[in-house]
Image (cartoon, rainbow, N blue to C red):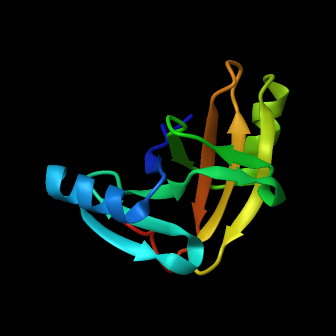
Amino acid sequence: MSKRAIVHIEIPAKDRQEAMKFYGELFGWETQEFPEMLYATFASGSVGGGFSPVGDFPEMNLSTKPGDVLLHIESEDIEADLARIEERGGKTVLPKTEIPGIGWFAVFEDLTGNHLALFTSNGNEQFPGQ
């Protein structure tokens, strides 16, 4: 089995503007805001990521609180990976979902209860911040 890279990291932020300024000034990360997605991205020089909103999102069966950092792992076949995760005792939290113009992601829960994500690019564009 080939090793799979972590391709995106999400850090919850109560205030995107404050997070963009804080990390930009502290580490020199380039940031870009996507207000229509309630999201901002950062480019760290290695793995990029984003600042996700804090709150409850019942339409997606998700809740994000401070400390819920989410790693996105590359996947060539999200549905197959979710099936393998469930066969091994993990759970699907959010099934394969489109990120318009970028690709697809899904969120799963591991055996400890940690949430992680799978990501597949649409081939046209990398995840923002990459």
In the rendered image of this protein, does residue 6 appear above or below residue 35? above
Left or right? Give the position of 16 relative to 88.
left
In the rendered image of this protein, does residue 100 appear above or below residue 14? below
Rendered location of residue 5, percent (x, y) = 44, 44
The quadrant in which residue 89 appears is top right
Q: Is residue 130 visible?
A: no
In the rendered image of this protein, does residue 66 appear above or below residue 50? above
The residue lying toward the viewer, choosing from 26 and 73, is 26
Rendered location of residue 90, percent (x, y) = 77, 28
In the rendered image of this protein, does residue 32 appear above or below residue 112? below
Q: Is residue 57 visible?
A: yes
Rendered location of residue 34, percent (x, y) = 47, 76
Q: Residue furthest top?
A: 112
Q: Residue at x 44, y 58 (%)?
A: 15
**Count of labels shown?**
0
Left or right? Give the position of 113 relative to 22.
right
Q: Residue at x 31, y 61 (%)?
A: 20
The residue lying toward the viewer, choosing from 12 and 72, is 12
The quadrant of the image that shows the C terminus is bottom left
The quadrant of the image that shows the N terminus is top right
Rendered location of residue 47, percent (x, y) = 34, 51
The quadrant in which residue 101 appears is bottom right
